[in-house]
Amino acid sequence: MRFYHRFLLWLLMALAAPVAVAVPPIKPAAEAPAVPADTLGRETPRSMVAGLIGALAELDYDRAAQFLDIPAPANNRQQLNAASQARAFHALLDDNGSLKPFAALSNADTGRLDDDLPADQEIIGEVKLQGKEVPILLTRGADGEHQIWRVSKETLAQIAAAAKGAPAAQPPAKNETLVAGAPLKDWGVLLGLGVVVFGGLWIVSFICVTVIRRLVADPAASSGYRFAEAALPPLSLLIAVFVFYNWADQLPVSIVARQTLLRYTGVITAIALVWFGLRLVDGIADLAVARMQRHQRRQIVSVIILARRTVKFLLLAFAGIGILGTFGIDVTTGIAALGIGGIALALGAQKTVENLVGSVTIIADRPLQVGDFVRVGDVVGTVEDIGIRSSRIRTGERTVVTVPNGDLSARQIENYAERDRFLFNPVIAIAYGTTSAKLREAIRIVQQVLAGHEKMAEGARARLGNITDRAFNIEVFSYIDVPEFDVQVIVREELLLAIYEQLEAAGIGLAFPTQTILCAPAEGVSPQPS
C-alpha cells in the first residue's frame, strides 16, 4: 500500500502545485541586494534533485558530489573520494532507490513546512538496503552566500552502515550504450512497460464502451452510456499512469531513466484529468440542455452553455500551468508580469470587459434566449448562440449576424417568441356604390366570421371605421389566440378567405383603387364625370 499512498500524495501535489505558485510573494518595501543564484541550482529541493539527476546522467561524479553534504575536497585524493561516494550513491539509486516524482517535490527555498520535519530538512526518497528502508534526507545549510539543499551526512552515514557486507552496486559503465544518461536497455524496459500498460487499458476501455453500447437500446438517449463513453477513455489513461508509476518505481533500472519518465507522467496525468473533465462537462451539459429543451426552459440553456465554456477554460488554464511547472518553467514570473501590466491590459480590453458584463446581463435579465425569433436593431432572425463575447442570430436569408453582447444588451430587443397571441386587424374596404343596408350586412358578416372561429380571442371587434375618398373601411381589431407563428398564419388565411367568400355570396364587392375626374363644362352645360 506504500506505493498507493505515495502516488495519491504525488497526484495531489501535482494538482496543488500550480495553485501554490500562482500568487507571487509580496516584496518588502526595501530589499536587500540580490544574491547571485547557485550555479548548481540547489536552492530548492526540486531544483536540487533535477541538478543531481542531470549530473548523474552525464556521469559527472565530481559535480554530483557537490549535491552531497560532504566537506569540499582540498586535494586530488579527497576529490576522488567524493566522486567515489557520488558513484556509489548513483549505483544504490539504480538498484534499490527511489525518488519522489518531480511534482511532489517542493519548489520553495524553505522546502515543505507541513511534513513534521525540522524546517531545514526534507525527505526526497528512500533506499532499500538489506531489508531496511533508509530515507534520503536533505538538509539546508550555508555555502558561501547561498542557502542550499544537499543530501544529508546522516543519510550518507546510514547508507554506508547498511551497505557494509553487501555486494557493491555498480553504476552504468561509460562504455555502455547510454541514451540521455541511462542505458538503452533500461529505456526499452520502461517504454515497453508504458506501451503495455497504456495500450492494454485503452483496449479494455474500448471494449467496455462497445459492450455498453450494444446492451443499451438507445445509446443516444442513455445517460449511463454517454457517461461511460465520456469517462472511460480518460479514466483508463489515469489508471494507466497509476499502474505505470507503481510498477516502474519497483524496477531495478537506471534512476535517470526512471526519474525522467516519472517526471513527465505528471504531464500525462494533467492531460488525463483535463480530458476527463472536458468530456464529463460536455456530457453533463448535453444532458442538461436536452432536459431543459424538453421542459421548454430555454433560458437555462444559455446559462448552461456559458457555464460549460467557463469551466472548460478554467480546466485548460490550470492544466497549462501544471504542464509548464512540470517542464520546470516558473509561472510565478509570468503571473507577476500580468499583474504589473494589469492596468494597461484593462485599458486596452474595455470592450472585452463590456462584452463580458453584457453577456452576464443578458443571461440574468433574459431578454432573449437560444431559439427565440427576435429583432435587434435592423437584424431580424433566430438566436442560435449566446456566447461569452457575442451572440449569433440566423437571419431569414440564412446568413449569420454576430452581435457583441455589450452592444446587444444596450439595444432595444423585440422578442417575437414571447408573444402569447397575434394581432389580427385587417381593413376591409367596401366599394362605393354599396347601399347602406349592404354595408351593414358586410359589417355583420365580418363580425360573424370573427365570432365563429374557435381560435379567436374574446373581444374581437369589427366596425365601420372610416369613409375615405375611395372606399368604406371596416376596421377589424382582434387577436388570434395561438402562440405559434406557423399556426397563426393558417388561422389568418382561414379568416380572410371566409370573409371574402361570404361577402362575395352576399353580392358585396370589395373596393379597388379608383379616381373620379370632373372635366370643366362649357357654358350652359352641366359637368359630367368621366
Image (cartoon, grey):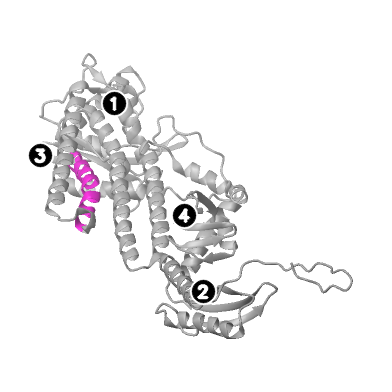
x and y percent of residue 167 in the render?
A: 11, 26
Mark 4, residues whose alpha carbon is within 10 Å: few (<14), some, or many (≥20)?
A: some
Tell whether 185 sits left or right of 335: left
Amino acid bearing label 1: Leu
Q: Label 3 belongs to which residue? A: 131
Q: Of the residues shown, which amino acid type is indicated by label 3?
A: Gly
Q: Does residue 313 sit above or below 420 in this rendering?
A: above
Residue 56 numbered mark, or none: 1
Q: Position of residue 481 (x, y in %)?
A: 44, 76
Closer to the camera: disc 1 or disc 4? 4
- For residue 424, the mark is 2
Quick one: 242 or 470, which is closer to the camera? 470
State the SS at label 1. Answer: helix
Crowding around mark 3 (Cα neighbors within 10 Å: few <14, some 14 to 19, many 20+) is few
Judge depth for marks 2 and 3 and give the one in front.
2
Q: Nearer the viewer, mark 1 or mark 2?
A: 2
Q: Say which residue label 4 marks.
A: 387
Circle 3 or circle 1, nearest the eye: 1
Q: Which residues are magenta?
A: 224-245
Q: Earlier in the sequence, mark 2 or mark 3?
A: 3
Q: In terms of sequence position, does the residue under pointer 1 or pointer 2 come before the other?
A: 1
Please, what secondary structure does the residue beneath circle 4 have?
Answer: loop
Local packing at callout 2 (Cα closer than 10 Å; few below 14, some 14-19, many 20+) is some
226 drawn magenta: yes
